Amino acid sequence: MSDAKGGHMLRDELRQTLEQGLRDVEADWTVPAAIINDPEMHDAERERVFGRSWVFLAHESEISERGDYVVRYISEDQFIVCRDEDGEVRGHLNSCRHRGMQVCRAEMGNTSHFRCPYHGWTYNNKGSLVGVPAGREAYGNKLDKSLWQLKPVPKLDTYKGLIFGCLDPEAQSLEDYLGDMKFYLDIVLDRSDAGLEVVGAPQRWVVDANWKLGADNFVGDAYHTMMTHRSMVELGLAPPDPKFALYGEHVHTENGHGLGIIGPPPGMPLPEFLGMPESIVEQLQRRLSPEQVEVFRPVTFIHGTVFPNLSIGNFLMSKDHVSPPTSFLTLRLWHPLGPDKMEIMSFFLIEKEAPDWYKEESYQAYVRTFGISGAFEQDDAENWRSITRVLGAQYAKKTMELNYQMGRGVYEPDPDWPGPGKAFPMDYAEANQRNFMEYWMQLMVTDPAPHSGNGKVSDDAAAETLARAEA
Amino acid sequence: MTTATEITDTTVREATEWLFTEAELLDAGKYREWLDLVAEDLSYVVPLRVTREREAETDIVEGLTLMDDDWDSMEMRVLRLETEYAWAEDPPSRSRHFVTNIRVAAGEAEDEVAVKSNLLLYRTRGDVATFDILSGERHDVLRRVAGGYRLAKRVVVLDQTTVMTHNLALIM
């Protein structure tokens, strides 16, 4: 159902559920189960959440050379994210302007041009239409190629190596969108002189679970470790102290972002700064602010989510039950494929100039504990698909509200925390999860801004982007 | 005596039987017994593949894999399954390893044979009437020891880039 303004209306029942949800998350610290697995919620979410938010596309190191490209998604829309011949990062809708065919059908590669296999319209990697077969004969001189460039992603920007795109040309800047989260992102992204690189390519796999469960888990859930990952606790790969998350901080910021930062339990001899190599520790102490250094010094686990679907895991973990721990860094995208299905893209990153021994150990710790075969992560997917299945049913959807009450009346925000955002002095908390869900529900009840309704809302922005790039 | 460079009918039969026995143990969830068939210098790798144009030299990604285990990490997986908390496989999946197109060739060392096989792995979980199927080619190195063979190396090249199962909790 469309309204006069071209956006999609929410059905009354859906709106009531969400508005009640917003009241409940504030007053009762509960979240309606109906937001997890519901086709109408998913339909609305595509436009109202993914149509408005900055969504992670790629890391700059994946397209380090001119002509390098990867194909990535915002909701169902696919974009060629590439470095053009002048070294600029671009995002083009992967769809020929003639009949809509994909002009790029590989996941990654290097090319100066994209040629549509249907009729041969050819675009350079700036997105300009540069070739039309039999153009003179078929179109005379009536085809103004400059009007038929590949549609650019309406907004594209980079923060410390992370490339994000946004479908809303009116959206706030990426800097503003990330807000206070930047302080914490910098600890991960900006701690070394040469920066990070994605190793290889992301693992990709499909899980029959709603994407929000991954985002919710990473944004604030240290509580699940002792039960979900109990097998690894028993093998000594996770802290044996069931209260380990007491020794952490639980922080959230505007726009739904949040993270947990956990140090070792008292008396547990673990190295500072995630046990990173001396050369990196030297660099981070120089590069980061004193407050960031103070926050990072005791850290053994960082878990967080940049709203909506980019999560970060920076963990100190052993590669098996007989080896000492090594830290690794993973980024993951919880890419929605439906109300009950997501694709997970799991990236492994490392400091470019880290010593080889550390790169190897870090890779092994990552690939054996996290990702598609990871001995930790396997159990997360099992839980999320089970939740998704159960909460897709009518009685569960209508009657269940989920308990997000941890910490209620137990503790107040931490006045001594050196970083920005709202911080709580332990990571057994659900303030981040409520913050995430509340922001998600706010986006869901906010109707689309009025526009001309002819579907060409992005054309001006597109032309502007192109003009800027060509200037 | 049979050397590695001389592949006899007996070698082919022994290697084939080894693969079938292994499949039976894995489908029966007898991971501890399976571990007894594995060499201590095991390398077990599931490469990461991406969709690339035909002109690309390979679609296998360098530097990252879907799985990269040695004996210690494989033992960790088995120990994990022996706890009461390995939820991903408890209740266990029902699996069936279909092993075909077995090709036996001389290995690099005298006591080793190189065995290629095609694998179709069928998996169901819980009471949900759906299944997952993984298809791939395995490149194994079997080492002859007293009383049989040990798996020294396995590379499983899966025939998917976006993998259609929620985890790789099963040994392939």
Image: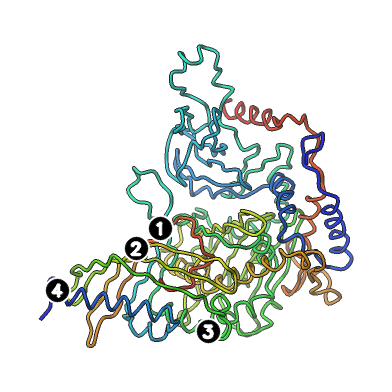
Q: Which mark is residue A235?
A: 3
**Percent from the top left, x then y, of residue B130?**
55, 66
Using the numbered discs, state the Cα–Cα distance from disc 4 to disc 1 in whole angstroms.
31 Å
Q: Are marks 1 and 2 in contact (CB under 8 Å)?
A: yes
Query: Which label's residue is closer to the chain start, 4 or 1?
Result: 4
Using the numbered discs, state the Cα–Cα distance from disc 4 to disc 2 in whole angstroms.
23 Å
Residue under label 4: B8
Q: Viewer-proximal residue, A90 or A101?
A: A101
Q: Which mark is residue B137?
A: 2
Q: What's the residue type where badge 4 is placed?
A: Thr
Name the residue at 30% across, 75% down.
B152
How many numbered discs?
A: 4
**Percent from the top left, x then y, of residue A73?**
58, 47
Using the numbered discs, state the Cα–Cα distance from disc 1 to disc 2 in whole angstroms.
8 Å
Q: Chain of mark 4?
A: B
Query: Which label's residue is closer to the chain start, 1 or 2?
Result: 2
Give the answer, above or below, for where B161 lies relative to B38. Answer: above
Q: What's the residue type where badge 2 is placed?
A: Glu
Residue under label 1: B159
